[in-house]
Amino acid sequence: MPPGPFISQDPKVVALLDGKSFPVLFDVTKVEKKDLFTGTYMPSTDLTGGYRILSYLDPSEPKHARLKQLLFFLLKSRRDHVIPEFQASYNELFETLEKEVAEKGKSSFQTANDQAGFNFLCRAFFGSNPPDTKLGTDGPSLISKWVLFQLGPVLKLGLPKYVEELLIHTFPLPPALVKKDYQRLYDFFYESSGSIQDEAEKLGISREEACHNLLFATCFNSFGGMKIFFPNMLKWIGRAGIKLHNRLATEIRSAIRSNGGKLTMAAMEQMPLMKSVVYEALRIEPPVPLQYGRAKKDIVIESHDAVFQVKQGEMLFGFQPFATKDPKIFERAEEFVGERFMGEEGEKLLKHVLWSNGPETQQPTLGNKQCAGKDFVVLMSRLLVVELFRRYDSFDIEVGKSALGAAVTVTSLKRASF
């Protein structure tokens, strides 16, 4: 796997190619997850204040449990802010899209989503509105540049191949070039997250280390996920066509009406098609498709039709769509089937939805590497679909390519007619 020499010391991996072999990557008794969040190389800790961030820690390391506990505290303490802040931020997004479509006949979902997503996360997690601070509206562009310095070795930017190979795939980009940008982000998070830092000190984590981890969890994990997954989900729903749009609009609006016109968690539980559509988008195009693990001991791994011996120390690699589009597990595996996870039989398939670095039917714990914000990501993805079809009967899009996710341009929005 890329990258090659000068960045990765050993690019060799054992690839897991189906839904039966892939889950060994989640078994922390068999694989170590230390320093392999980005693959066969680890970005310089100069990009994260000198600290190894939670994503790079193995559960056996003492700090792993304390830092993950801090993220659980953040999510629990701010849960009542998620729905109202999402609605406020994404209402602004829809107004921007409508205005631009009316004026120019099209609007970039990416640009509007970057701003709305970052504002939402900062308002929901920290009660801070970036445009009212020194950071202004610069957050998304600062993050994109900082992420490039971490993921550059494995990204395709669309430049001529030899230019990309020389510029970003052969030598690590010097962290000094984004030091000022990162400091601006850090100062914003340090000033905004005082109460969470207080909790960190009770857990034995310094305020500084807590802040670097909160920045990473918000900007890399959460914002990065929204930046990739929201356009991808919009792409699949847009392509599915008007019949699915009508069914979603009808289900979503009637559930909200029967809950007194308010959007609540209870109302969303009465939207089985909407829930299934979100899971199907997470299945067909997981936002983080590459996962790694290093064998802790000699192990035997079974695929559907063979058995393999893997030696201690070998790097295991999985391209998740090989597992989540495995035709021996999913019928019409390559197709987007909106109702796939509805009903009793559909729900049984959720154990094969793996986007969170674990099965959808399991929960993150202090002792595993499943995404701490698993339920939060599902909730905000559902909120996007709900708010979209609460407001519009249907929409049209054009899809292009970008380095992260799909480049989605909205070309029409049909306002709600019932």
Image: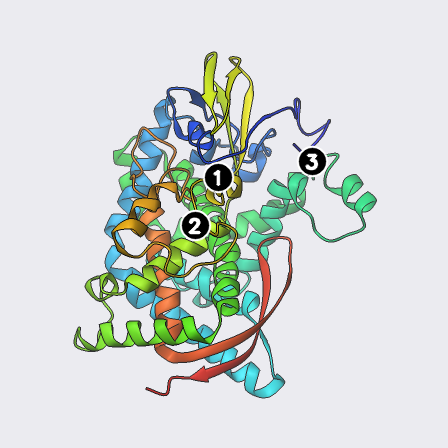
Q: CA distance from mark 2 to mark 1?
A: 28 Å
Q: Is residue 343 above or below residue 97?
A: above
- Residue 252 position, x and y percent, is 30, 72
Q: Which mark is residue 172?
A: 3
Q: Is residue 283 above or below residue 58?
A: below
- Give the residue displayed 80% in from the left and 40% down from the top: 166
- Give the residue displayed 24% in from the left and 76% down from the top: 254
Closer to the camera, 272 or 307?
307
The colour style of the image is: rainbow
| Mark 3 residue type | Pro
| Circle 3: element type | loop
Q: Which mark is residue 323?
A: 1
- Residue 80 position, x and y percent, is 23, 59
Q: Which circle, 2 or 1, is nearer the viewer? A: 1
Q: Is residue 167 left or right of residue 109?
A: right
Closer to the camera, 330 or 362?
330
Q: Which circle, 1 or 3, is nearer the viewer? A: 1
| Mark 1 residue type | Ala
Earlier sequence position, callout 2 versus callout 3: 3
| Mark 2 residue type | Thr
- The answer to whether the residues at label 2 and label 1 have Cβ atoms under 8 Å apart is no
- Residue 374 position, x and y percent, is 35, 46
Res 401 → quadrant: bottom right
Q: Which mark is residue 218?
A: 2
- Give the residue displayed 33% in from the left and 52% down from the top: 376
